[in-house]
Image (cartoon, rainbow, N blue to C red):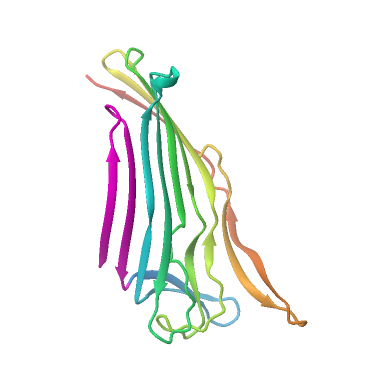
Amino acid sequence: YVDNLDLRYEWYPSRGELISLAVFYKHFDSPIEWTYTVAGGTDLIYSYKNAKSANNYGVELDIRKNLGFIGLKDFSWSFNGALIKSKVQFEKGAKEEDRPMQGQSPYLINTGIFYKNAPLKMDIALLYNRIGKRIIGVGRSEGSTGDDSNSRVPHSYEMPRNTIDFSLAKKFGEHLELKLNVRDLLAEKIYYKQFADVTYSDGSKKEVEEIARCYKPGRNIGLQATYKF
């Protein structure tokens, strides 16, 4: 189960506008995490494990603002951002290190510019999104159970990535509407990396970064026509 505590202040400067600031706390009891183990050679065994608990807390800012004050009366801007501290808790005496909960990013950014023109029957949106580095797979040693892991198998991280989406909707008369959607305009590569602490023969230590997987998802373009009788 999850316990939530949220304290929020909201201000509405004018119709359709919002400035909101919130602090929040979430407690997860026995959260399920996706894990993997190394079982001889490079063979991987994937499974799900429950940690004892996890705590997330942070601050979130929401802004919706019309841009008419700078002469752009048909434009508006939105912003949503959050800073999040996450920590998984283990049983007393466990050898697992403190770390964020699997799948939780330390920050989130969502912002966009919107254009709406009623006489032209046109709506346009340009959206930007970015998430912080997050664990997508918890590394454990073969035979480890629950949180009692002495594994040096590194966790797998999804690295930060920028995405931009574009959409346009245009009505023609009273019956026809065309919509264009383009997802992931930048089409940046998606990187999954592992970070391992290596001790050299001279006693020095260094964190080694390795790319576990990399691929380019490409853009997604959609065109839709709707005719209402």
Residue 192 coordinates in the image, percent (x, y): 56, 60
Question: Which region of the structure is painted magenta?
Answer: 1-30
Seen at 49% across and 77% down, the residue is 97
Residue at the farthest left position: 229
Q: Position of residue 229 (x, y in %)?
A: 22, 19
Q: Give the overall secondary structure of the magenta segment.
A: strand
Given residues 82 and 13, the one toward you in this image is: 13
Q: Which residue is found at the position 26% from the left and 15% from the top?
A: 174
Q: Residue 22: say if magenta.
A: yes
As displayed, is residue 124 above or below residue 196?
above
- Residue nearest the observer in this picture, 55 or 146: 55
Q: Residue at x 42, y 57 (%)?
A: 84
Where residue 39 sits: x, y (%)?
Answer: 53, 81
Q: Quadrant of residue 33?
A: bottom left
Quarter occupied by residue 148: bottom left
The x, y position of residue 162, in whole percent, is 53, 44
